[in-house]
Image (tube, grey):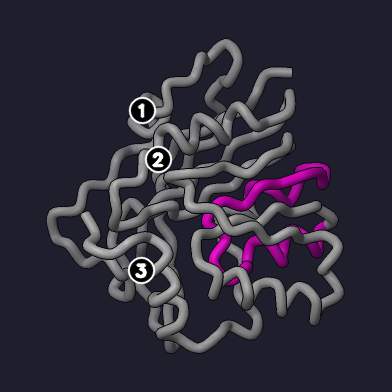
Amino acid sequence: MMTTNPVTFWDGVYAARPAATDPRPNVRLTETVTDLPPGDVLDLGCGEGGDALWLARQGWHVTAVDVSAVALGRLTELALAQGLGERIAAERHDLHESFPQGAFDLVSAHYLHTPDDLDRATVLRKAAHALRPGGRLLVVDHGSTAPWSWNQDPDVRYPTPRQVAEDIGLDPATWPLERAAASRRTATGPQGRTAEVTDHILIVRRAA
């Protein structure tokens, strides 16, 4: 459990590194979303906005949520500079305490890992309930530790996608499981470092 609050921790993480000038979208997002019709999307833990900016360029209306005002400020500047300000609404939420309002065609939660005791199952359950009929919840988690990760705990445990689904506890008649898989790829980190990593991918759809 962390000794400082989430705002202090994540503001410190982002403030300690240079602002990204062209943040990349996550691979698992682009491969999942490319064939979906644009709509309203909630990006949980948006960081500096690689996913949010990419989604907006594809025609989505994005609610981008993070606990860090530093990250959200950087995203807002990039969105305005790229002419995407009307497609991206940046909102600061500590997900321990609040959850964004609205109904969405997609909720994306990429690497929503944090060193504090966030009740992820409750957050992801709220996300599933925020889906419109036919909408999807995409959860992508670390399945391995990258050399540049902030968490280098050798004893860290990575739940499987099906374990994540079980923890969320959704009724499969209303939220059927579309995908639960582990997939390896070569990732690029800070200063161009590369490493082979495992992603855990969960996709749940709200029945029409």
Dots 2 and 1: beta carbons under 8 Å? yes
Disc 3 crowd rating (10 Å Cα; few below 14, some 14-19, many 20+) is some
Quarter of the image where the C terminus is located? top right
Residue type, mark 2 in image: Arg
Quarter holding residue 76? bottom right
Q: CA distance from mark 2 to mark 1?
A: 9 Å
Image coordinates of residue 129 in percent, x first then y, are 60, 27
Residue 116 within the magenta-colored segment of the rendering: no
Secondary structure at badge 2 equals helix
Quarter holding residue 131? top right
- Residue in the foreground of this view, choosing between 6 and 191: 6
Quarter of the image where the N terminus is located? bottom left
At horizontal 62% and vertical 68% (from top left) the residue drawn is 50
- Dot label at residue 9: 3
- The residue beneath circle 2 is 120
- The residue beneath circle 1 is 167
Image height check: is 205 above or below 171? below
At horizontal 80% and vertical 81% (from top left) the residue drawn is 81
Secondary structure at badge 1 equals helix
Image height check: is 160 above or below 129? below
- Dot label at residue 143: none
Residue located farthest toward the top when viewing the structure as drawn: 173
Dots 2 and 3: beta carbons under 8 Å? no
At horizontal 53% and vertical 25% (from top left) the residue drawn is 177
Q: Nearer the viewer, mark 2 or mark 1?
A: 2
In the rendered structure, the answer to whether residue 143 lies left or right of residue 183 reads left
Query: Is tag 2's residue or tag 3's residue first in the polypeptide sequence?
Result: 3
